[in-house]
Amino acid sequence: MKKSCFAFLVVVSSLANSAFAQSWIYQTNEPTLGYGSGSGLAVSADGNKPIAAVYYYANPFSYTGQERPIFHSTNSGMIWSSGDSLSPYYGWALVSSSADGSRLAVAAIDGSVSISTNSGTSWTETISPLGQTWDSIVTSPDGQTLVLAGENTAVYISTNSGISWKISQPNVPSNFWPSTIATALNGGKIFAANFLDSIYFTTNYGMSWDAATAPASLCWSLACSADGKKLVVGAYYSPIYISTNSGTTWTATDTPTANWISVSSSVDGKNLAAIQEDDGRIYTSTNSGMNWVTNDAPSTNWIRIVSSADGSRLFAVNENGQIYSKFFVPSPVLNLVSTSNHLLLSWTVPSTNFVLQKNSNLASTNWSVVTNAPVLNLTNLQNEVGIFPTNGSVFYRLSTP
């Protein structure tokens, strides 16, 4: 009998009665971030571990000697906690996270940079105060590669989790780099949008760079898909622009002309989110930017938005340091790839708990959990499970426990 194996997607969604919501929720248990805390926000791939950095407290012009720990959550912001007494004491401007939320990096308003390898429990300073204003910091999914840039500086890169840094040369000018650095998850691709000039990209982790045409002048924000093919750019008083060929050509979307200061993207480039200063609204797209809708977010001065790998968990922070979140019901899709001696089932890291199940008969309710533990592929943020064909048909599905 011919061996065969079929992958059949059935998402059993008990999420309709769960904590998932279709409206923006104010994180009432959030830390007190204080005024101007916007860029200090990041989240793990599964959306369960948001990280928030304290910028200013009540007096935005006096920060010397005041403790500013990094706050983190392990349950999507329901409860927040801070690190131990080793937490830094600077006014933090930026924070970034590895895929699992264990490796963090923060940049301070005095130009210092610190890293954590234990989800923010303790910190080590790796760049001493430079009097430099940092504007962008990103971390690769494995936490090994970090990219840092600021106002009138070159791009700095670390390939050892932030222990040491080097200026990325050649061909990258010192200029103004707002929140416009994005890393693809494979091939060493890094994109950096220059506020005054163009978009620069590297395919070898910053050893060399090339310039590409920017879709508009004064680019404020940039995000990309895992493969680096789909880009989304927010610019100064322009519509949002998208590219499906790594920035070779650009298309203006149907978004209004506005000052788009922060954008986010799922790893497949389908689920996008963006915020702008003009009307205080948040815009989302579920088809790679072809169409956009406004959300029921409160009208406020949003300054940062981040998303989970699947784009179903969003976190946004405003000028006053208030964090809001929005959860969509995720619908992970099973992918099936044939290798030399087995089949590989994979799905994007979901923003809620799903388990892989199998059944030999779709008419039966006798589904069993696949005991093979999924392995996270950091090049595409896919959970992967290897399976071997057997005589007959086997059906697979993702289900909530």
Image (spheres, rainbow, N blue to C red):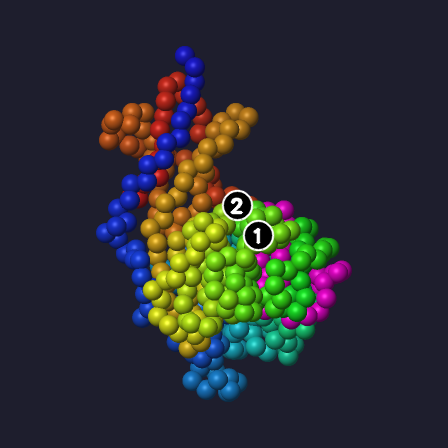
Query: Which residue shows up at 45% across the image and 36% down it?
Result: 335
Point out which mark residue 7 bears. none
Q: Is residue 382 left or right of residue 197?
A: left
Residue 361 vertical placement versus 26 (above, below): above
277 or 208, nearer to the observer: 277
Query: Which residue shows up at 43% across the image and 18% down it?
Result: 3
What residue would you read off at disc 1?
243
SS under mark 2: loop
- Where residue 316 appears, x then y in whole percent? 42, 66
Callout 1 crowding tier (Cα within 10 Å): few <14, some 14–19, many ≥20: many
- Where residue 266 appears, x then y in whole percent? 47, 52
Position of the N terminus, as image quadrant, is top left
Counting residues from the start of the chain, the first of labels 1 and 2 encountered is 1
Q: How far apart are the alpha carbons under marks 1 and 2?
A: 19 Å
Residue 158 vertical placement versus 345 (above, below): below
- Where residue 254 appears, x then y in whole percent? 48, 58
Q: Amino acid at mark 2?
A: Asn
Callout 2 crowding tier (Cα within 10 Å): few <14, some 14–19, many ≥20: many
Residue 302 appears in the picture as rendered: yes
129 or 336, nearer to the observer: 336
- Where residue 300 appears, x then y in whole percent? 39, 74
Q: Which segment is the magenta one? A: 166-193
Q: Which quadrant of the structure image shows residue 159?
A: bottom right
In the rendered structure, are the residues bearing label 1 and label 2 in contact, judged by CB atoms less than 8 Å apart? no
328 or 374, nearer to the observer: 328
Residue 314 appears in the picture as rendered: no
Query: Is residue 93 highlighted in magenta?
Result: no
What residue would you read off at disc 2?
380
Query: Which residue shows up at 49% across the image and 47% down it?
Result: 268
Query: Is residue 181 highlighted in magenta?
Result: yes
- Main SS of residues in magenta: loop
Tell which tag, 1 or 2, sits nearer the viewer: 1
